[in-house]
Amino acid sequence: MDTGSGANLTPTAILYAAEHPVRDLFAGGGGKALSVAGHYAPRFMDKVLGWWGFDTQKTEKPNRNRRHDGLHEPSGGGNERGDYAGHVAETSLYTKGSMHPLLTGGLLLAGVGLVYAVAKSHERETAINHEPDTERGFRRRKTQARAQPIPTA
């Protein structure tokens, strides 16, 4: 099975869903975003998609095929891609993450741990570089090294 890149993203997601018990699997983060927005703001999304969604799917170019369906015979020449002139994402980190939940969870946990370690390091450095000043709270310590006398024999 392919890793989910290029034109194989959607078929890979379909095969993964057929082999694994998943409730929902979106081929791309955009589909998931639209689904979440539709769940939490259904009226708003109805208006947005009514105003914008249908027009983005239309074109002034005539259809290459006379028939608009594939009921009795294939409707196209087996083309893998359409003729959409806009941006088409070749990969989806969201879909890859959905198909590998343990790896995704581990990477997220490692990222949180890294952020925590950096924050603690910064906190420790801030505490070392400041000393109490009774009048104004904290003042910055000078970090320049003082000249040490050279020992003579």
Image (cartoon, rainbow, N blue to C red):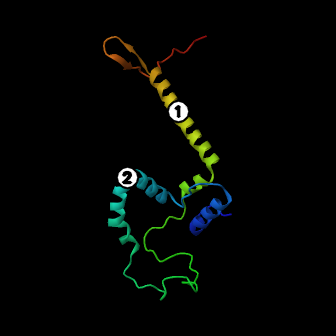
Residue pictured at 52% horizontal, 36% vertical: 115
Q: In this view, does 66 lie above or below 26?
A: below
Q: Is residue 119 above or below residue 141?
A: below
Q: Quick one: SS at disc 1? A: helix
Q: In this view, does 67 lie above or below 18?
A: below
User: 28 or 23, which lies in front?
Assistant: 23
**Residue 60 falls left or right of residue 125:** left
- The residue type indicated by label 2 comes to Ala
- The residue type indicated by label 1 comes to Tyr
Residue pictured at 31% horizontal, 16% vertical: 136
Q: Where is residue 67 in the image (x, y as percent from the top left)?
A: 49, 87
Q: Position of residue 68 (x, y in %)?
A: 48, 83
User: Which of pointers 1 and 2 lies earlier in the amino acid sequence?
Assistant: 2
Disc 2 marks which residue? Answer: 41
Q: Tell me the mark number nearer the camera, choosing from 1 and 2.
A: 2
Residue pictured at 56% horizontal, 35% vertical: 113
Disc 1 marks which residue? Answer: 116
